[in-house]
Image (tube, rainbow, N blue to C red):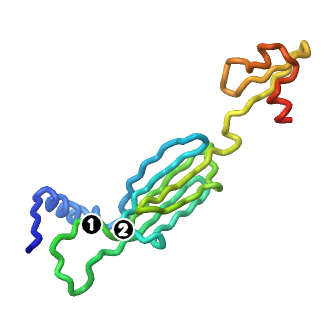
Amino acid sequence: MTLMHFDPFRDLERLTEQAFGYGRGPRALPMEALRRGDGFLIALDVPGVDPSDVDVSVERNVVTVRAHREPLHSHGDELIVDERPTGDFSRQLFLGENLDAGELTAEFSNGVLLLRIPVAEASKPRKVEIADRGGDSRTIKTGSAEPADAAETGSAQPADAAQMA
């Protein structure tokens, strides 16, 4: 049985990449990014890459992910079809100041690199106690125009404020 596959569009794409040099530099890693609770999750696809060939580095607010995949074929093999991308792959992520890059963690499973980046403590919502000149105080959650329950009941010190002190 002979494996032959002719796809004129793929062949045209391959010729275009060779002519314009697209295949010479590192390729981007496909990713999915989302916010979950007090952190961000970033999944990068690196199928067929050995975990030891993946490098994650952080410099200030830039996360760089590099990976390398060797081709399966070796010298002397008769290559019939070669559509799997090989070589160097790279992706840079620019993090906002509200993320804590120092607490970034990474795990690798089933060809997916998962990065977890928590929101910095200083950027998390918090309650701020507001003193009233009349002697009453109330707590307002930052970013909210609604007073907390303690202010509505008129108590001098909310329960949460006692715990925060």
Residue that lies at the very extreme toward the right in this rendered image? 135
Q: What residue is drawn where x is 35% and y is 70%?
A: 87
Q: What residue is drawn where x is 66% and y is 26%?
A: 143
Is 159 above or below relative to 113? Answer: above
Quadrant of the rendered image containing residue 144: top right
Q: Position of residue 103 (x, y in %)?
A: 64, 55
Q: Position of residue 23 (x, y in %)?
A: 29, 65
Closer to the camera, 10 or 3?
3
**What is the secondary structure assignment of the residue under circle 2?**
loop
Closer to the camera, 89 or 15?
89
Q: Which residue is mark 1?
A: 84
Which residue type does callout 2 highlight?
Gly
Left or right: residue 96 versus residue 110 is: right
Left or right: residue 47 versus residue 135 is: left
| Mark before the other along the chain sequence, 1 or 2 | 2
Q: What residue is drawn where x is 75% and y is 19%?
A: 149
Is 78 above or below relative to 30? Answer: below
Left or right: residue 14 versus residue 85 is: left
| Label 1 close to label 2 by CB (< 8 Å) | yes
Which residue type does callout 1 highlight?
Arg
Q: What residue is drawn where x is 17% and y is 63%?
A: 15
For label 1, the crowd category at 10 Å Cα-Cα, with few meaning under 14, some 14 to 19 and many 20 or more, is: few
Q: Nearer the viewer, mark 1 or mark 2?
A: 2
What number is the disc on residue 48? 2
CA gap between label 1 and label 2 equals 10 Å
Q: Position of residue 150 (x, y in %)?
A: 79, 19
**What is the secondary structure assignment of the residue under circle 1?**
loop
Q: Position of residue 125 (x, y in %)?
A: 68, 34
What number is the disc on residue 100? none
